[in-house]
Amino acid sequence: MSKYLAGHLVADFLAHNGVDTVFGIISVHNIPIMDGVTLNKTIRMVMTRGETGAAHMADGLARATGKVGVVISSTGPGASNAVPGLVEARFAGTPLLHLTGQSATAHLGRDTGAVHDVPDQLGMLSAVSKKAYRVETAGDTLAVLKQAWADALTAPAGPVSVEIPIDIQRSVVDRPVHAQDWLAPAPRVAEPAAADVDALLRALRGARRPMIWAGGGARDAGRELAALVDMGVGMVTSWNGHGVVSDDRPENLGGLNGPGSPAVQALYEQADLLLVVGSRLRGHETLDHKLKLPARLVRIDVDSAARTRGYPCESFVHGDAAATLRQVVSRLREEPLQLDQAFTAAVRAAKTRAIEDFKQTLGPYADFASQLRAVMPASAVFARDITLSNSTWGHRLFPLHDQRQNIYPVGAGIGQGLQLGIGAAIGSKDRKVVVLTGDGGFFFNMTEIWTAVQEAADMVMIVMNDGGYGVIKHMQDAMCEGRYAHSNLLAPDLLKLAELAGMQAWRVSRAEDFGKTVEHALAVQGPTLVEVDMLAIGPFPPYYPYSAMIAAARTASAEPATAAGG
């Protein structure tokens, strides 16, 4: 190779920092970077059918593997197509590096009509990314990439964008000589202040019935949280944090964190302290912060803004969750907590009761979680979309053993689960991936099934098909007196679609056949599809809070007639 370009340096930087897979689409404003990927020979380039899919797949790979996800887009329309994936990665706290082209430096900010030029691309990316950078000169390329990499990994992790003008990508640069010259700095770890840890320990030692609520920010603190659970402390997780401690532990209620579960809400009334670790206590898990949590609440979070966010806390530790809890666990082993053993027993009993109570709300789908768990490998990744099944048994009843198995759209955006799952499957070379989606979400980006086929992604796509947006219909029952406007979908035959894509596929028309059908699909290497015909099996019951809202609306509409009849 006679010339070594800045675009080639980008690819070599990725390889030196452990990247073996990138997602994207080749285009006029990223060809030098893509050529660098080709020349490097150690990086797998996954050609997606759209930049939106590429960004979500990079996110899914990062969540499943713990690595930095990398997406490469073109300028303007290409960069804007990646925005949904950047937004979701920021919601989920996923370390993501977005590399995009830019018009030549001579055209920047001049509105000359250059190809793909959009006003203030950097401003757009700054709005949706944790940070966004522009490489101003070819000589700055490596330094900017190192900074962006460290920023993406530093907690709270998130997506970082780097735009590189096309003339800079084509510029000749010197290749770094020493291996250490390529390496980005290690992410900064926020160590807690000693006085804050002391205050937290005083609060814990003063409690006899403490509980933990762990979120996605605790994903690297599983060992420390498990130690607290083993001491007898009860635990729930956010849906993003689900799996940080295995659901096998009877004191861990996992995603059964309260709304719609009287048994869990009764625990909160008995608990005398709630330790919140790395969680926003999101509105859709706390009824927009109306869920009654224990009156005393203490918090550990790497984001200092969490001190005044949502529920008030009496004690706050600004620090990395794992670093903080290591100190806490060490000191509690020297001076153990004095726990009310009756409350610990109540936590175990509440878990059993909450599971059984929740199953009773699911109608013909009551056993879907247990059927799926029985046939899925223990190590398999469970990726989901926003759909009725995920919002109910997917989040709350399906047991997980590791946080890396837990992938879903944290920002509650429909249509992202399929791509997240494809990325997870491409990154998880030794694990099966199961994707749970509804028909509405599946159709958002179903062209990406051809990416799954081309890349031989080892995954099962379960499509819960009810002919439209089922959760929206429940909301319309509650708010619009059952007027189902804009929620039914004309759709292709999914088995014929799978055949066209070259995938094996099955249709489930009876609830009792669900597990064994998925088992057949799991036995096949590569992508497969299982359609669940919900119109044949029966309607999915409304879940809390919509079930309560619908019941209230029906009661209210019946009251005048009852009064008149009396």
Image (cartoon, rainbow, N blue to C red):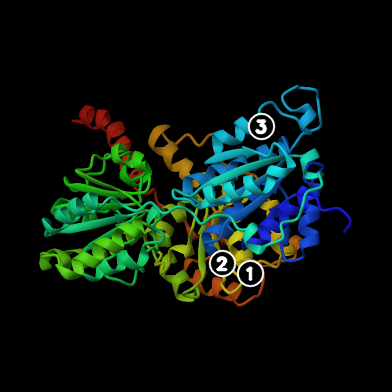
Q: As drawn, which residue projects farthest toward the right?
A: 2
Task: Report crowding for label 2: few under 14, some 14 to 19, many 20 or more residues within 10 A (C-alpha).
Answer: many
**Mark 3 and mark 2: Cα distance apart in space:** 35 Å
Q: Please, what secondary structure does the residue beneath circle 1 have?
A: loop
Residue 11 image point, x, y percent: 72, 55
Question: Vertical placement of 296 versus 347: above or below?
Answer: above
Residue type of the residue flagged with mark 1 = Asp
Residue at screen point 49% across, 60% down: 537
Q: Residue tagged by mark 2?
A: 433
Q: Is any part of residue 265 visible from this angle? A: no
Mark pair 2, 1: CA separation: 7 Å
**Residue 508 % position (x, y):** 56, 66
Q: Quadrant location of the C terminus? A: top left
Where residue 406 sits: x, y (%)?
46, 61
Q: Is residue 162 visible?
A: yes
In what quadrant of the picture does the N terminus appear?
A: bottom right
Q: Nearer the viewer, residue 366 or 255?
A: 255
Pointer 3 or 2: first along the chain: 3
For residue 477, above or below residue 531: above
Q: Which of marks 3 and 1 is in front?
A: 3
**Residue under pointer 1:** 458
Alpha carbon separation for disc pair 3 and 1: 36 Å
Q: In which quarter of the image is residue 181?
A: bottom right
Residue placed under numbered mark 3 in the picture: 121
**CB atoms of marks 2 and 1 within 8 Å:** yes
Q: In this view, does 513 lie to the left or right of 10?
A: left
Judge by depth and name the residue closer to the eye, 461 or 180.
180
- Amino acid type of disc 2? Val
Three-letter code for the amino acid on which mark 3 is drawn? Gln
